[in-house]
Image (cartoon, rainbow, N blue to C red):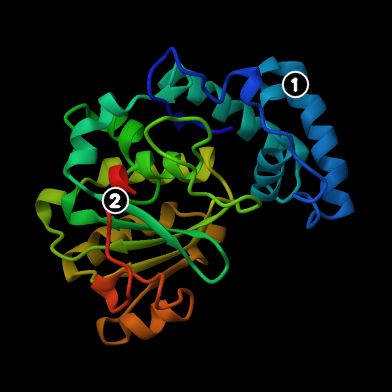
Amino acid sequence: MESVVSPEPSQKTPSDSSSKQVTTIEELKDSTDAELTKIRLMRAFVEARDPSSKEVDDLMIRRFLRARNLDVEKASAMFLKYLKWKRSIMPNGYISPSEIAEDIAQEKVFVQGLDKKGRPIVVAFAAKHFQSKNGADGFKRIILPSDPMQFAFQVLLLNDNKYFFCMMPPGQEKFLSIADIEGWGYANSDLRGYLNALSTLQDCYPERLGKMFIVHAPYLFMRIWKMIYPFIDDNTKKKIVFVENKKLKSTLLEEIEESQLPDIYGGQMPLVPIQDS
């Protein structure tokens, strides 16, 4: 599995062979014959170059292939780079809650409910993010690629942890995000950090973002967005929607049932801090 939060080093982590996930035929049922062939080719290629590749399932291999239009060579290079990144930034294979206690307490991100396609909903508040004291590297460790916290993304993929439970339903690979920019100002303008987070999302977690709604975006943010936009790949650009304030609820309801929509956007679900969900 991809990097996850783990309670303590003594606990089993997804890097343990005992926690390795096995991809079933049912999970790969929407794969084309070409994809199934390329999955086998890519697996043989990457396992020969990095034995730790044996610990990932076919769904991850497929995500990297799809991100590179089934080009085995390009997808393999991308995947091997991801494994190297993971080892360098998380040598133990996980991020401990104690490392990100401050970010958890600030309640930047909420993960709860499912959209109409069964994708978990991530609500992120950009005005609660300030440039990391640890610089760009610190930001890449704790920030969610594409807006506030990588921690929330890891909870989505969680497998074995006594503090949190897995919020990614079986067979689901993507999530929907609501990026709330209300109150965002110069103090939150961490362009370098945003670009690093964007790079992490695109290069290390491909084919995970299903859709992103950007709401309450002020004029100042749009100026920063113009600088970020050229660095977003075309597939990701198609998934991002800026929502007008007057059409906020109606637009969100196109993807989310009212019972699953956060109450701050006119729905029925109260927001619950991620550590309490």
Query: Which of the 4 image quarters holds residue 178?
Result: bottom left
Q: Which mark is residue 109?
A: 2
Q: Amino acid at mark 1?
A: Glu
| Along the line of sight, the residue nearer the viewer: 152 or 129 | 152
Residue 184 image position (x, y, % from top left):
15, 59
Within 10 angstroms of label 1, few (less than 14), some, or many (20 or more) residues?
some
Q: Which quarter shows the N terminus? A: top right
Within 10 angstroms of label 2, few (less than 14), some, or many (20 or more) residues?
many
Q: Amino acid at mark 2?
A: Val
Q: Residue at x 48, y 75 (%)?
A: 255
Residue 159 image position (x, y, % from top left):
53, 35
Question: Does residue 250 lie above or below 68 as drawn?
Answer: below
| Along the line of sight, the residue nearer the viewer: 204 or 96 | 96
Q: In this figure, which residue is indicated by the disc labeled 1?
A: 47
Q: CA distance from mark 2 to mark 1?
A: 35 Å
Q: Is residue 219 left or right of residue 26?
A: left
Query: Which of the 4 image quarters holds residue 103?
Result: top left
Question: Does residue 147 lie above or below 200 as drawn?
Answer: below
Say which element carries label 2.
strand
Whichever of callouts 2 and 1 sits on the residue coming sooner in the sequence is 1
Q: Residue at x 75, y 43 (%)?
A: 71
| Along the line of sight, the residue nearer the viewer: 29 or 195 | 29
In this rendering, which labeled residue sits more in front, label 2 or label 1?
2
Question: Does residue 137 lie above or below 27 as drawn?
Answer: above
Q: Is residue 88 left or right of residue 223?
A: right
Q: Which mark is residue 125?
A: none
Say which element carries label 1.
helix
| Along the line of sight, the residue nearer the viewer: 149 or 68 | 149
